[in-house]
């Protein structure tokens, strides 16, 4: 496997449950988490300690310089907003049991959890979450700010648009193109292309509504 962590110190933005998993991955990789920022510590995980409370009102007040960041927020749109705010370098967190083909490419800010598999020629963008035991097969294109949930299976030649959330255990058959800022329900089976912003559930997957709040 290549490129587990390119920094020995990492800062995190986000102190909730998703942050706990990233911290676990980083610690197992021998990486020190030197600071954890959060806008709203009331919502942080009970085990999160020493949180630096911040807000994103004035960019000049924020310590952008320093160790690289990972945005430890599960919500794709929030991760997108914070990435636009931070004027800094980003790094990755890749669990030691994840399997990545050497010809796959992984963008900065992306996290890959235990047991995930990324097959040949797949391109994973920036600030993506490939969650526990997710399978992303050959020649996929996974755009920025996507979340592939636990146990989801993406067959060959699948494309997932920016900001889309693939729910736990969903199956996407080969050559399907899923649009941007979609939600694919847990356990859904997607047999055909999905338009931007669609919320799709079931087997076979059907559009039940649109993510209108995400349309800009
Ligand atoms: C480590 C981690 O935790 S990673 C996080 C992983 N998270 C997930 O996988 C969650 C994925 N989210 C879901 O599956 C959600 O149910 C969503 C986003 C698809 C829909 O949520 P909501 O917008 O709240 O829709 P709501 O619950 O009102 O359901 C609307 C309809 O779709 C149905 N429905 C919702 N989800 C699904 C699903 N996954 N499969 C089949 N049908 C579904 C509901 O039964 C309901 O049907 P009805 O109108 O006939 O009663």
Image (cartoon, grey):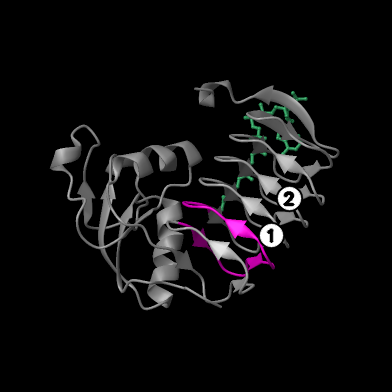
Residue underneath mark 2? 158
Residue 71 lies in the magenta-colored region? no
Corner quadrant of residue 109:
bottom left
Secondary structure mostly taken by the magenta-highlighted segment of the chain: loop
Look at the numbered disc 2 and give the secondary structure of its residue. Answer: loop
Where is residue 115 shown, x and y percent of the image? Answer: 62, 70
From which residue to which does the magenta span run?
A: 110-128
Residue underneath mark 1? 136
Q: Are marks 2 and 1 in contact (CB under 8 Å)?
A: yes
Residue at position x 55%, y 40% in the image = 163
Residue 58 lies left or right of residue 193; in this view the side is left
Closer to the chain start, of discs 2 and 1, is 1
Crowdedness near tag 2: few (<14), some (14–19) or many (≥20) residues, C-alpha within 10 Å: many
Residue 95 lies left or right of residue 51; in this view the side is right
- Quadrant of the image for the N terminus? bottom right
Where is residue 38 shown, x and y percent of the image? Answer: 29, 46
Look at the numbered disc 1 and give the secondary structure of its residue. Answer: strand
Respond yes or no on whether mark 2 lies under 8 Å from ligand 1. Answer: no
Residue at position x 30%, y 61% in the image = 68
């Amino acid at each position: 496997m290549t490129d587990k962590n390119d920094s020995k110190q990492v800062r995190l933005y986000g102190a909730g449950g998703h942050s706990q998993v990233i911290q676990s991955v980083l610690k197992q990789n021998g990486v020190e988490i030197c600071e954890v920022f959060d806008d709203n510590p009331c919502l942080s995980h009970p085990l999160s300690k020493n949180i630096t409370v911040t807000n994103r009102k004035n960019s000049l007040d924020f310590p952008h310089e320093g160790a690289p960041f990972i945005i430890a927020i599960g919500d794709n749109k929030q991760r997108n907003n914070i990435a636009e705010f931070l004027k800094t370098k980003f790094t990755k967190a890749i669990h030691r049991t994840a399997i990545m083909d050497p010809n796959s490419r992984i963008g900065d800010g992306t996290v890959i959890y235990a047991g995930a598999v990324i097959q040949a020629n797949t391109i994973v963008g920036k600030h993506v979450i490939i969650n526990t035991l997710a399978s992303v097969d050959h020649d996929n294109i996974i755009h920025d700010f996507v979340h592939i949930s636990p146990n989801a299976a993406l067959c060959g030649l699948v494309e997932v648009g920016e900001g889309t959330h693939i729910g736990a255990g969903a199956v996407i058959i080969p050559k399907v193109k899923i649009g941007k800022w979609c939600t694919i329900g847990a356990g859904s089976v997607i047999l055909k292309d999905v338009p931007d912003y669609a919320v799709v559930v079931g087997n076979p997957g059907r559009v039940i509504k649109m993510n209108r709040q995400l349309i800009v």
